[in-house]
Amino acid sequence: MKRNIFLSVLFTLLVATAAAQCPLQNTAFSAGEGLKYQLFFNWKFIWIKAGTADMEITSTKYEGKQAYRCHLITRGSKRTDKYFFMRDTLLGYVTPTLEPLYYRKGAFEGKRYTVDEVWYNYADGQTHLKQRYKDRHGEVRDTANTRDECVFDMVSMLLRARSFDPSNYHEGERIHFQQADGDGITDEVLVYRGRKKFTTEDTKITYQCLVFSFVELDGKKEKEVLTFYITDDANHIPVRLDLFLKFGTAKAFLTTATGLRNPQTSILKK
């Protein structure tokens, strides 16, 4: 699966459910929410600022029906642009009950520009996906898939998962889900690591968090790809991401959160 060091990480909190259970009440966010992140990369034992990420949720209509629009963009800094250029944009539309309608990811990384798109419909009680991938050479591949289960992309995963109730999760619990991009659907796994406190570097705010790890199979062994922290309150905002990459380690920290739907009861200290 194609990944960006920030974007794909942010959107992997999904429990797979039956198609009849795809609608879910949104309890976590409202239109007007904005989140900003600072990205860091470990370069020869030194942490350097690698860029920023901004996410915004608005109310709109999709094909004449009410929907939420989520837009997220990452930008590399001028310093890191010298080594690796990155301008990635994610766009997603979901119903008021958090069912995905449309997804697009435009990834400009290095000298490569690729586009993933997914369209959804739910005829006959199934999830039907039209998928399109445009590779770095400009060639387009169209595919179609149908599943009896719910299927989500990176944007709809995040929006949906923020309304889950994790109160019954047990440390070490494994969460399975299906994720779609422009040319496929993959089975993924999350592991719940428990609750921890986290203090941000820039804002010095201390949060009570729920911690998850995203793991992949590496032969017969499981390889931890990332660990991320979400606020232990009704907002479930991602506040810290730790990425373990082949070429080093990257981190993302929340710097600003505006237009939140619920009180930030996870804040322990300001």
Image: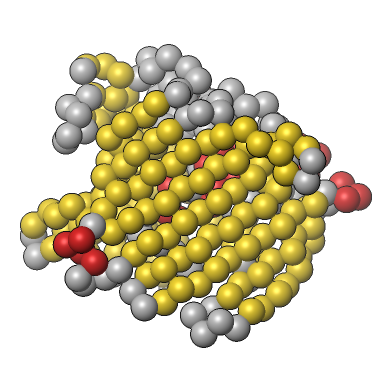
Query: Residue 106 location, x and y as percent?
Result: 50, 63
Answer with the quarter of the image where residue 99 lies: top right
Query: Residue 172 location, x and y as percent?
Result: 43, 41
- Identify which residue, 171 or 73, lies in the foreground: 73
Q: Is residue 22 left or right of residue 226?
A: right
Residue occupying image coordinates x 74% and y 50%:
149
Q: In this view, does 73 lie to the left or right of 84?
A: right
Query: Residue 95 location, x and y as percent?
Result: 71, 37
Residue 166 visible in the displayed image: no
Residue 92 visible in the displayed image: yes
- Name above or below for residue 30 compared with residue 157: above
- Name above or below for residue 148 compared with residue 81: above
Q: Is residue 162 left or right of residue 210?
A: right
Q: In which quarter of the image is the C terminus?
A: top left
Residue occupying image coordinates x 88% and y 50%:
123
List the single residue furthest toward the right: 124
